[in-house]
Image (tube, grey):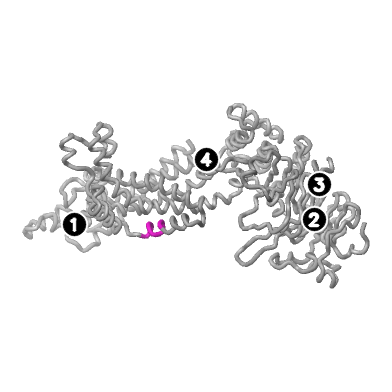
Amino acid sequence: MPFSREYIVKRLILLVFVVLGVLFITFIITRLIPARPELLWAGPHATIEQIEKARKQLHLDKPVYVQFFLYLQDFIMGNWGISWRTKSPVFTDVLSTLTATLELVIVAFFIAFIVGVLTGVIAALKKYSWIDDFIRIVTVIGASIPVFWLALIVQLVFGNWLGILPSAKRVDEWIVIVTGFKPITGFYLIDSIIQGNLAVFVDALKRIILPALVLSTYPFCLSARMTRAVMIEVFSEQHVKSLIAWGLPERTILFKYSLKNTIVPVIASLGLSFGYTIVGAFMVELVFVWPGIGFYAAMSLLSFDYPAVIGCVITVAIFYCIINTVVDLIHSIIDPRVRL
Amino acid sequence: MTDQPILQVENLTIDYVVLDGIIKAVRNVSFTINEGEVVCLVGESGSGKTTVGLAISRALPENAIIREGRIIFKGRDLLNLEIRDKSTIEDKVMMIFQDPAATLNPLFKVGEIFSDVIKHHLKLSDQLKIREKALEFLKAVELPDPERIFNSYPHELSGGMLQRVIIAITLSVNPKLLIADEPTTMLDVTLQAQILDLLINLKKKFGLSILFITHNLSIAAEIGDRIIVMYGGEIVEEASSEELLKNPLHPYTKGLLECIPKTHIKYSKLKSIPGMIFDLRNPPLGCVFVDRCTEATDLCRKDKPRLIEFLKNHKVACHLYRGSTK
């Protein structure tokens, strides 16, 4: 392996500090919002005494820094608090919604990477032709369209008008009940295959297509444009010219050699776009009623559910760090000059 | 060495189209290379020497336009061949470049690139035989421990080793004419001599003709049978190495020779030719060297001197040598 164990340990230690920082910032920001979450906690018909009791219970009567340290203590112990909205532990809430989001994001990134790189390669090969122009225009538009608008339009057109694909939820509850499907890993596509449950697999696949396509729009456009730009640059490099001079077939030069040079920066940029895609997931999940962490976070935000919001933000931050570490590791595997 | 020309370049004129005009990089260049001969193309930056090399190996960048001329290699005009035919020519023109580190793809092992080249060129499929063949070529370029080099990534090798590897790969394609574009410029002086020796040895061993492009007259004198001096996109003088060093005719060649530091005189001031090369977008009407020439006359400004054979096998383009021919 081109990377050492120390490197991974170092990145994990760094992760702890990132999480602490994110924790601190989100905690302060949520406390700065002039809202009275104790009202929500105590319910709509609570008396003043009950509200006062709720304040004490939630430590809202204490100074902010005391609140922070109390929270930190619990957080490390795995107690991420009780969601003020759902009244269940945030940790389990986040875990149960996380897999739904991960499934969506992984499928979206998979589409974005494969189709994006292919599109970029075509654009680079047909540089300055009408195909290239077309791809460039489409990818600029795609990268600029707000994801929530696209989600609504796609849902309207494909879900409602054309009625080709279902446009809400991960799987039909009836099919789940009838076939006795039980999630194991939380990734429905994988679970249904493990259990040999074709009906659930097909339904889950149908339902993931639209939100995944919408979510993949931005990283797809990014990777297509990136691939085109990098590949054109790679083509002009001496090492490609020398392969041509040495008489290797174009196919080998393109798919074996140049593509490998191109893919490194494309993967890096996709890794960086992960954060943006998660924000997109918030919108997409809301529109497609996808029971993921984005949907959960959006609902929690709307109801000033501090512990849930922080739990979501921390989870996303951890994943962002992990993704970027993985990207670095992939980089070191592809490029022999990089040793971590 | 025979007097059979392997390469004839006739009236080669090449322009580069750039944003703010047309660079007339090479104008009316004609020369021949005989079989087994080492011809050096000497000139400073912007003299068009690399462009000539690229044109012969048909590796000109996209913005280059060949306005005129023929490049006849082994009886076939390279400029009229379809690109597809290029791979079918058995006797090839190969080029090696200045920067060995940029010539090999950094993400692949030397052996992998070499194997692919051998596989496609010699139509071999047996991995062991390919490897054997590659190691043979690596040995031929006098590399120590070819096994290790075969399994190395380019960044693990030094510049000199890389240049040898590149020469080995290039030779495996079986070229008849090798164009070496300043292959030693980025190397240490000690390595330079080694690579030059190697090229001369390989020339004999593989029956190569070499077009050696350099800005360094002393290297040219060392390696070349014949030297062609270019300035501003035109040939100004051409002669055998000994003749040119002994009896330089063109003021530019004289200037170049004076620029070589003299080691036997201590504290001598380093010489240079005053002035800069002209703007290649507007080449002068008359002689290309007129602005920097100490002996320029009105005639030099108005009339372009033709390349004439002033002495036997010694061509020069200068009005100073107008009167008598041969």
Indicate the chain on which mark 2 is placed.
Answer: B
Q: In which quadrant of the rendered image does the C terminus of chain B lie?
A: bottom right
**Where does label 4 land, which residue?**
A256
In-front residue for pair B162/B181:
B181
Indicate the chain on which mark 3 is placed.
Answer: B
**Where does label 2 land, which residue?**
B229
**Where does label 1 land, which residue?**
A303
Estimate the x, y position of residue B90 in percent, counting from the top left: 69, 38
Whether B317 is among the magenta residues is no
Report whether residue A210 is seen.
yes
Is there CB contact under 8 Å for labels 1 and 4?
no
Secondary structure under badge 1?
A: loop
**Where does label 3 land, which residue?**
B224
Q: Which residues are magenta?
A: A138-144
Q: Is residue B226 above or below residue B108?
A: below
Residue at the spot x=89%, y=53% of the render?
B246
Indicate the chain on which mark 1 is placed.
Answer: A
Secondary structure under badge 4?
A: helix
Instruction: Report, in whole angstroms, how far the alpha carbon at label 3 lies from the one at label 2.
Output: 12 Å
Discs 4 and 2 share one subunit:
no
Residue at the spot x=69%, y=54% of the render?
B51
Q: Residues within 10 Å of mark 4 (few under 14, many from 20)?
A: few
Estimate the x, y position of residue B289 in percent, counting from the top left: 79, 65
